[in-house]
Structures are given as C-alpha cells and as structure tokens.
Image (tube, grey):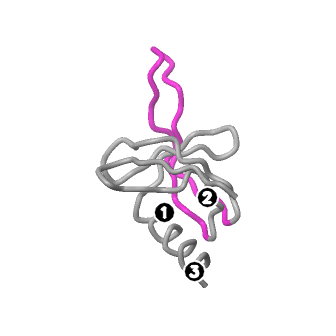
Amino acid sequence: MKTETTYVAEETQFERIYVLPKIVSAIQILPSEENESSRLGLLTQLPEGAEIEIGGPGFNDRTLRVKCGNAFYFVFLDDLELVRKRMAAVAYA
C-alpha cells in the first residue's frame, strides 16, 4: 500500500490519512457568515476509529487542519504525535 506524506512545519512529516486509535480533541472549523474566510467552532472530540485526512497547517505551530467525514477541524500536534508513534510501533512490530 502506497501512502502519501504531508509536511506541515519545518521537517515535520505526517502520513496523509490516519485512523484514530483513541479519542482526540478537535476544534471545529466553520465558514464565516460575513466573508469567505473561516472561524473557530465548538471544541469537540473525534471518536476512536475515525479516519482523518491531514489537510495542512493549523492556526498556529501546535495544530493541524484535518478533515473527518464532511467537516474540517483543527487538532493538536501533540495528540497526533501519539497516534504517529503508535502507528510506527505497529509497523515495525
């Protein structure tokens, strides 16, 4: 299986698609009512087993933009770092 890789910050590399092995906190991204920009929505949780697609950098250097289902979210790199480490450990086991 070929995987795509996304670079989001200096030398920070993530696979393009993940299945979450645990619940991950996320901030919903909503379209702005005034213009074509976006605004922050509610703080929510993406469920264990959810498939997310990395969409690019977040609103600061500690977040990423992801898509889950038909919605977009910001998630924290620290949460995905745990996911990335678990996936690497399984791949090498």
Kindly identify which numbered label has been placed on residue 18.
2
Under mark 3, the amino acid is: Tyr
Position of the C terminus by quadrant: bottom right
Quarter of the picture holding the N terminus: bottom right
Q: Give the range drawn in magenta.
A: 22-48
Question: Looking at the rendering, which quadrant does residue 89 occupy?
Answer: bottom right
Dot 1, how many residues are within 10 Å of its Cα: few (below 14), some (14-19), or many (20+)? Answer: some
Question: Where is 40 relative to 48, above or below?
Answer: above
Q: Is residue 13 left or right of residue 15?
A: left
Whether residue 40 is in magenta: the answer is: yes
Q: Where is residue 27 in the image (x, y as percent from the top left)?
A: 49, 47
Residue occupying the point 53% across, 47% down = 54
**Badges 3 and 1: C-beta atoms under 8 Å apart?**
no
Q: In this view, does 50 lie to the left or right of 89?
A: right
Q: Is mark 1 on a helix, strand or loop?
A: helix
Q: Name the residue under label 3.
A: 92
What secondary structure prevails in the magenta region?
Answer: strand
Placement of 26 over or under 85, stated as above or below: above
Q: Position of residue 62 (x, y in %)?
A: 34, 54
Q: In this view, does 19 lie to the left or right of 65?
A: right
Position of residue 9 measured from the top left corner of the image (x, y, whole percent): 33, 49
- What residue is drawn where x is 48% and y is 71%? 82
Disc 3 and disc 1: Cα gap in Å?
18 Å
Q: Earlier in the sequence, mark 3 or mark 2?
A: 2
